[in-house]
């Protein structure tokens, strides 16, 4: 084999399958684009009629539909739930949270100044009472079958990853809208200023220009307001992601102790 052939064979290549778009993804993209065009047309009507608040509100919804497609309902419901509730959206993540609360008490878990997680004295083969949920049953089965910690961690990860992906997906979409709204507000202001300057004449006074300038600047104001709202909502998902990561790390530490000590798990 020649040197050039070896170089070609050893270099990473893009497979055609990796560039393929399935029907579900394409449908969501088409729905998002169509929804964006329809809702943005409504926003344009509000802008022309100088209803700037509703124009920017509708524009923000159009952007959210553009990036989410059919998932817009799920994103909105998730945002309301996360903003007004302390519970996780995915039942599996709720099981993780519930089980960890019991493990903290049983294992006397603490985190020191360096961020390291420590546990109290746990006897080998001691019985541990945990809540009755699917995660506890899976962990109980893993311990009884004598599986190692890596396998147990894999089981716990399946209860963590789905919720983490949902929070990350929602946060990214809200961040996109938050970053885009000031630009839309600035565009509205520029359009208003252009219209104002085009109407300038010899008999124009400051008193006649001030109201028009104030109206033009409203789009920038509302763009910043809605950007802040989406960013505040997105920050809730940031907090949940950090909490979820912290819970998962702590749970894995507790799981390691249980597996190493071969504790007997009893379901309450």
Image (cartoon, rainbow, N blue to C red):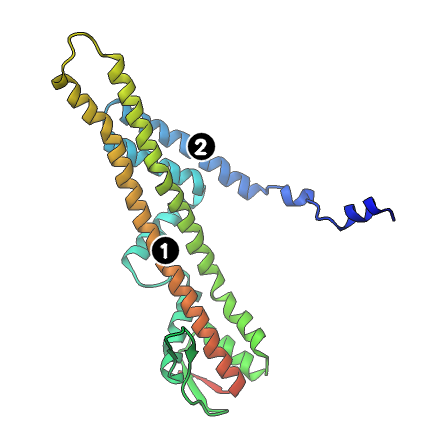
- On residue 34, which mark appears? 2
Q: Nearer the viewer, mark 2 or mark 1?
A: 1
- Evaluate whether residue 224 shows in this view: yes
Q: Residue 39: x percent and y percent?
A: 36, 32
- Evaluate whether residue 89 shows in this view: no
- On residue 80, which mark appears? none
Q: Nearer the viewer, residue 79 or 183?
A: 183
Q: Nearer the viewer, residue 132 or 11?
A: 11
Q: Is residue 209 above or below residue 56?
A: above
Q: Secondary structure beneath disc 2?
A: helix
Q: Residue 172: x percent and y percent?
A: 42, 48
- Residue appearing at x 77%, y 45% in the figure: 8
Q: Are marks 2 and 1 in contact (CB under 8 Å)?
A: no
Q: Nearer the viewer, residue 202 or 93?
A: 202
**In this rendering, position of residue 18 left or right of residue 183:** right
Q: Spatial distance from mark 2 to mark 1, Cα to Cα? A: 28 Å
Q: Residue 155: x percent and y percent?
A: 53, 71
Q: Earlier in the sequence, mark 2 or mark 1?
A: 2
Q: Secondary structure beneath disc 1?
A: helix
Please identify the quarter of the rendering in which residue 131 is found.
bottom left
Q: Which residue is mark 1?
A: 237
Q: Residue 59: x percent and y percent?
A: 33, 34
Q: Nearer the viewer, residue 179 or 163?
A: 179
- Residue appearing at x 44%, y 32% in the figure: 34
């Amino acid at each position: 084999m020649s040197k050039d052939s070896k170089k070609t064979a050893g270099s990473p290549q893009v497979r055609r399958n990796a560039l393929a778009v399935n029907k579900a993804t394409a449908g969501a993209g088409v729905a998002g684009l169509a929804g964006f065009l329809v809702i943005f047309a409504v926003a344009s009507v509000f802008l022309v009629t100088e209803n700037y608040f509703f124009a920017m509100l509708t524009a923000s919804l159009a952007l959210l539909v553009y990036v989410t497609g059919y998932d817009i309902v799920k994103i909105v419901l998730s945002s309301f739930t996360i903003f007004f509730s302390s519970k996780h959206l995915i039942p599996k993540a709720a099981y993780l949270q519930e089980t960890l609360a019991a493990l903290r008490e049983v294992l006397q878990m603490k985190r020191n100044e360096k961020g390291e997680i420590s546990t109290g004295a746990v006897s080998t083969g001691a019985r541990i009472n945990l809540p009755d949920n699917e995660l506890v049953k899976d962990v109980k089965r893993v311990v009884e079958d004598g599986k190692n910690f890596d396998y147990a961690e894999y089981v716990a990860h399946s209860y963590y990853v789905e919720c983490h992906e949902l929070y990350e997906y929602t946060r990214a979409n809200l961040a996109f809208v938050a970053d885009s709204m000031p630009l839309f507000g600035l565009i509205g202001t520029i359009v208003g200023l252009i219209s104002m300057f085009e109407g300038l004449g010899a008999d124009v006074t400051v008193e006649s220009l001030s109201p028009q300038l104030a109206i033009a600047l409203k789009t920038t104001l509302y763009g910043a307001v809605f950007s802040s709202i989406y960013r505040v909502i997105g920050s809730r998902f940031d907090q949940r992601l950090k909490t979820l990561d912290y819970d998962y790390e702590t749970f894995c530490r507790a799981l390691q102790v249980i597996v190493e000590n071969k504790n007997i798990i009893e379901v309450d």
